[in-house]
Amino acid sequence: MASVTSLTAHVNQRLASALSAALPEAADSDPLLRRSDRADFQANGILALAKKAKANPRELATQVVSQVVTGDVIKDIEVSGPGFLNITVTDRAITENLAARAADTDGRLGVPQAETPGTTVIDYAQPNVAKEMHVGHLRSAVIGDSVVQLLEFTGETVVRRHHIGDWGTQFGMLIQYLDEHPHELDHKESEVSGEEAMSNLDRLYKAARKLFDSDEEFKTRARRRVVDLQAGDPHTLAMWQKFVDESKIYFFSVFEKLDMEIRDPDIVGESGYNDMLAETCRLLEESGVAVRSEGALCVFFDDIKGPDGNPVPLIVQKSDGGYGYAATDLSAIRDRVFNLKANTLLYVVDARQSLHFRMVFETARRAGWLNDDVKAVQLAFGTVLGKDGKPFKTREGETVRLVDLLDEAIDRASAVVREKAQDLSEEEIAERGAQVGIGAVKYADLSTSANRDYKFDLDQMVSLNGDTSVYLQYAYARIRSILRKAGDVRPAAHPELELHAAERALGLHVDAFAEAVAEAATEYAPHKMAAYLYQLASLYTSFYDKCPVLKAETPEQVENRLFLCEVTARTLHQGMALLGIRTPERL
Ligand code: ARG
């Protein structure tokens, strides 16, 4: 294991042991260390501890200072204000720590992995069969993919589940129509593009709908089809499979455009739980968690009432015997807990489904499927808004097709790349354009906390200034270009060198990468990783403004600054990968 203890953690440990020596009852308490502008760190924890022990905070702080060993890592520690501690670390410690990170042979920059990882089943990227994907599906995919990367990087075992909407009464209508117009989904050539697949489905859906609404006899036949489908009639199932397959061609094309790996075996849609539905209902009814009410099987909650004050139940089985969304989700919980052995169930789903999940989770808790050891969390995301601050729609009031949006982002980004391009070929411009455009869309989504709504503003997203992925990608490309220019001069750490303030600030931030990863992963908060990276790029920029690299004073200083550039670049690259965003070598 090549994990490296960060300077924050190191100083924290020293303070904690000095604190427990000075005040035994404060053993194990947190000195509350923070990065600070005045010194490198400030510890604010003494005040509260002194208050609790009825001691004088300044005196306690002074005692702690006298217990702290200085010289190697800690250069200076002093009491300030009413009992804060200001701590400065040595230049040597910073460079040595970074050197240890760079030397991590696992290529993890010294970020530790969990010793006893748990298993998280994450439900994300769940579009619906025979339907166009929209911006809501984009959010689930982008946020979910980043959380997968973050969790896996910390060592967690992650099982991905794409709970696609592949079941329901609308398939009766579609299948019946296809049965009566058998060649509508036939492909002349074996290769069908995602766009074609979607336009086939769209055309078929519209035609079926029109017939359904105008022709009573077709309607009856379509309804009978639903029954056949639910009864597992082989011919009907085969037709249904055609819709699923055609949709998957389309889904995969969108995910590919999104530069996101979605694996077929991880796609377990609603239909995947059909065999469990009856048993789920039986278990809930027998245990008394669910009760019959007007023929339907329902679960009631004290605190969930409709606008009329009447309780709103979760309907597990309808009075006609049909199962809906809730029965499927409850069955999926049983599968994920008992078969996949999850400790955590995570759902990356629109906040507008929060009531559904609250009821489903509470039901599962009452049934004993969830408990203190197995928890379920909805990572609820907000709505994507247009520039006008209203839910994102086309001018005609229709939902915006995701593919159109991605294509537009790629176009805009290509224009930006082209404008700045000096020695890039057309092919390279196209490739970078896609990486920058998709990165821009992902970053805009990930850099605000998921539960907030965010404005889809392409102009802002591909801007070179400000908190955008392009800014980070340029920072990375600029560092790589310096490293190329250095030619034969290799980056090398020289811990004996004194550091400039801008080098210290950058170095300390690079050293804090592990903490940023841990925080973003445990809180399912990609936006914290984004904030860390933005700060990293900003600190790099000010280092670059103040400290000449290739023209530094001594050969050692050149090497050391190149080293700082390199470890910054690696951190940026790794951090962006955790957001699912590429960092091209040249831009
Ligand atoms: N397919 C659903 C939609 O488009 C999202 C599925 C969410 N996951 C779940 N387990 N219910 O809204």
Image (spheres, grey):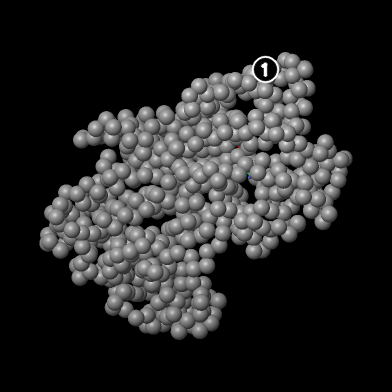
Quarter containing the C terminus: top left
Q: Name the residue under label 1.
A: 210
Q: Residues within 10 Å of mark 1 (few under 14, many from 20)?
A: few
Residue 475 on image: x %, y %:
29, 46
Name the residue located 68 percent from the left edge and 33 percent from the top edge: 237
Q: Does the residue labelled 1 lie within 8 Å of ligand 1?
A: no
Name the residue located 51 percent from the left edge and 79 percent from the top edge: 26
Q: Is residue 518 above or below residue 406?
A: below
Determine whether, in the image, residue 81 is placed left or right of residue 371. left
Residue 130 on image: x %, y %:
60, 30
Q: In this view, does 208 lie above or below 18?
A: above
Q: Is residue 321 above or below residue 152?
A: above
Residue 125 on image: x %, y %:
54, 42
Determine whether, in the image, residue 282 is placed left or right of residue 567. right
* Image quadrant where residue 383 sits: top right
**Does residue 177 appear in the picture of this structure?**
yes
Name the residue located 32 percent from the left edge and 74 percent from the top edge: 74
